[in-house]
Image (cartoon, helix red, strand yellow):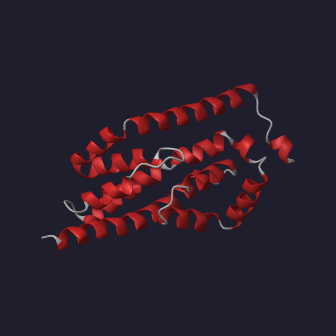
Amino acid sequence: MTVEEKLKFTKPQLLLRIALLVLLLAGTVLLILNRDEIQHLAIYGYSGIFLVSLLSNATILLPLPGVMITSAMAMAFNPLWVAMASGAGAALGELSGYLVGFSGQPMLEKSERVQKLTGWMQRNQSWTILLLAFIPNPLFDMAGFIAGASQMPVWKFLLFCLIGKIAKMLVFAYLGAGIFSVFE
């Protein structure tokens, strides 16, 4: 099956993908406009930390400062559980990038740069997701886009994203708790 044959969608499939893409972009704008209110969710303990992290990572290409909330909350709560809640929320939030890639698949596969990166990701899929989820960077969404467009199994994307995000949040949580202990 050629790439052109794979990219042919029925009208309902195409409309669903376009609607999903528009919904995700609108959600990003809404989250950015309400970023101050989102940060107040942290007062609800671990579930609030989970929600803040989920919403902070649900944006597309415009990150919100979720890791800073993780560091701050680790000053008041157990850093291990802060990292677990924050990492789980972050991994689920990254599904937005995956879904954009899935819904925008016809557009992504036509770019030569994306095709090269897609080829690299297909050879190193799991490790790429894990590494990029661990490294603090605003471009993780591109990995999600490519994972969705290349139809990486969602469970695999979430698993390696979860491992990377929890590891990253552990670093930020213990750094936050350590900074606080200096001032005691």
Q: Nearer the viewer, residue 20 or 141?
A: 141
Give residue 19's position: percent from left, percent from top. Answer: 61, 29
- Snapshot quadrant of residue 84: bottom left
Q: Is any atom of residue 32 visible in this view?
A: yes
Q: Position of residue 66 (x, y in %)?
A: 38, 53
Q: Is residue 184 above or below residue 28?
A: below
- Residue 163 pos. (x, y %): 46, 64
Query: In screen coordinates, is 83 left or right of 163?
Result: left
> In the picture provided, is 48 more to the left or to the right than 34?
left
Residue 65 versus residue 125 in the image, above or below: above
Name the quadrant containing residue 11. top right
Q: Quadrant of the C terminus?
A: bottom left
- The residue at the point 44 percent across, 61 percent down is 165
Taking the spot 30% from the left edge, 45% from the top edge, the residue there is 39
Between residue 171 and residue 123, name the one nearer to us: 171
Q: Position of residue 90 (x, y in %)?
A: 43, 53
Residue at (47%, 63%) from the top-left corner? 136
So how many labels did they put on this image? Answer: 0
Write the residue at 58% across / 48% down.
98
> Can I make out residue 1 in this image?
no
